[in-house]
Amino acid sequence: TIAYGAAAVTQRMVGFLLLPLYARVLEPAEYGQVAVLMTLTSFVGTLVGLGLESAVFRTYVQLRNRPAELSRFVNTVGAFAVIFSILAAAFLAIALSSVFADLFDVPRAGVVVAFVGGAFWASVATVPLAVLRAQERLRAYVRLSGLQVALTVGFTMAFVVVLGWGSVGWMLAFSCSAALTLAVGLTMLDHGWTRRLHGDDLVTALAFGLPMLPHALAHWGLSLSDRAILS
């Protein structure tokens, strides 16, 4: 619990401590755009994640003593989660980026990057982070979380502070960080990925994950309500 909590607190604490620096290079309106774009990222991540994070964690624990079935399950659901989330987010970006940009008065490029970043982060949470938690590999979990924090700070410094790309740069930093964290996380799992997928494993995971989407989207709606009121 301490390890998981420390990872979550560290991610937020680092951003808070760097707030004075970011405030010197971002205008108030750009901060508003960042808030909207991060909300869109959360929405897309929740939507394309299909509730599979909980399904992966739960099933991994259930199959702990059946290594062959466990490996097959991780291979099927993990590959599907990563591929589907990225393709679905790309489709949503193509179809809806202009609509959301006009609706919320944010840059269209920022919306596109926010959608892609949401997909990468959903993949990180669903596969490497969920599996590392199920395996109780706390050191690996903390290292991966720390890497994500370091990458986010580094890219944000480069794109926002140095290059001055504003809200689009902020989202690009988040997306690049999530993509690299996903790549490193998949490597840390040391799983022999194959192209062979099993439909039964996928159906089992979706049957558990999809009914959780309304709850997750309602939770996202709560985080959006204050921004709607302020707007």
Image: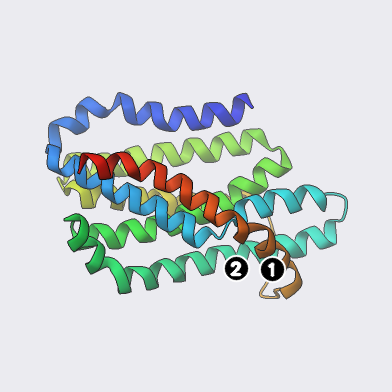
Q: Residue 202 has which mark?
A: 1
Q: Position of residue 142 (x, y in %)?
A: 57, 34
Residue 97 shown left or right of residue 122 in the figure: left
Residue in the image at 53% along x and 68% along y:
83
Q: Position of residue 165 (x, y in %)?
A: 17, 49
Verify CB contact (< 8 Å) between mark 1 and mark 2.
yes
Q: Residue 80 has which mark?
A: 2
Judging depth in this view, the residue of 231 and 69 nearest the camera is 231
Q: Is residue 183 visible?
A: no
Judging depth in this view, the residue of 46 and 17 nearest the camera is 46
Determine the CA span between mark 1 and mark 2: 8 Å
Ranked by sequence position, the earlier of labels 1 and 2 is: 2
- At label 2, which amino acid type do we have? Phe
Which image quarter holds the N terminus?
Answer: top right
Q: How is the image coloured?
A: rainbow
Circle 1 — which element? helix
Question: Considering only vertical position in the picture, is 16 above or below 133?
Answer: above
